[in-house]
Amino acid sequence: MFDQEDSELNVVMGVVFGIIALVIAFVIGLGAYQLRGAQAPVEPATDMFVEVAEVGEPLVKIHFDLGETVLPPTAAAQIDTVVAALAAAPEAHALLSGYHDETGAAAINAEVARNRALSVREGLLAAGVPAKRVLMRRPAVTLGGEDAAEARRVEVRVQ
């Protein structure tokens, strides 16, 4: 008689633990789905990067706060500098290079660097620069020297 009760108890406990495992898996999956949605790219995921060699020093460096992809308030003057340089050189392009540091997951860092470069691109387009004159390189890792904030930047070259 006790053997039958023990086996019934084992079945009930198995069902309870199975339900708990399903609930935990659902919560983790929901969290991962929401995180992925929060880091959605600014534009559709198309291959918009070019393989162009960087020539000379950057005209401007736009620095971002940790984890930020929105243009900082200081970027307006830097965008104006790029627009003026492009107006002075009608055949030149603005080459955007986004950088990130080594902390955190590489894929997330690359996506943040890409979105920072896209923010700068959108700023240039809003200032009247034609889209065909704005080129983007793939995000790159950099140490940033003594200041980690130096790694969180987008460099703009007019070449």
Image (cartoon, helix red, strand yellow):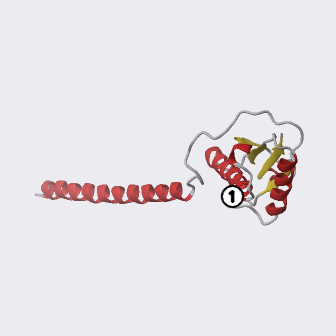
Q: Quadrant of residue 67?
A: bottom right
Other residues around mark 1 within 10 Å, as few (<14) / some (14–19) / many (≥20): many
Q: Residue at x 38, y 57 (%)?
A: 26
Q: Residue at x 13, y 55 (%)?
A: 4
Q: Where is residue 80 in the image (x, y as percent from the top left)?
A: 83, 58
* Camera-nearest residue between 71 and 10: 71
Q: Horizontal placement of 60 versus 109: left or right? A: right
Amino acid beneath label 1: Thr
Q: Which residue is drawn at 57% across and 55% down?
A: 39
Task: Label 1, secondary structure: give it.
Answer: loop
* Camera-nearest residue between 110 and 43: 43
Q: Where is residue 62 in the image (x, y as percent from the top left)?
A: 80, 55
Q: Position of residue 50 (x, y in %)?
A: 69, 36
* Camera-nearest residue between 145 and 140: 140
In the picture, which quadrant includes the C terminus? top right
Task: List the residue tagged with mark 1.
Answer: 69
Q: Residue at x 69, y 43 (%)?
A: 132
In the picture, which quadrant includes the N terminus? bottom left
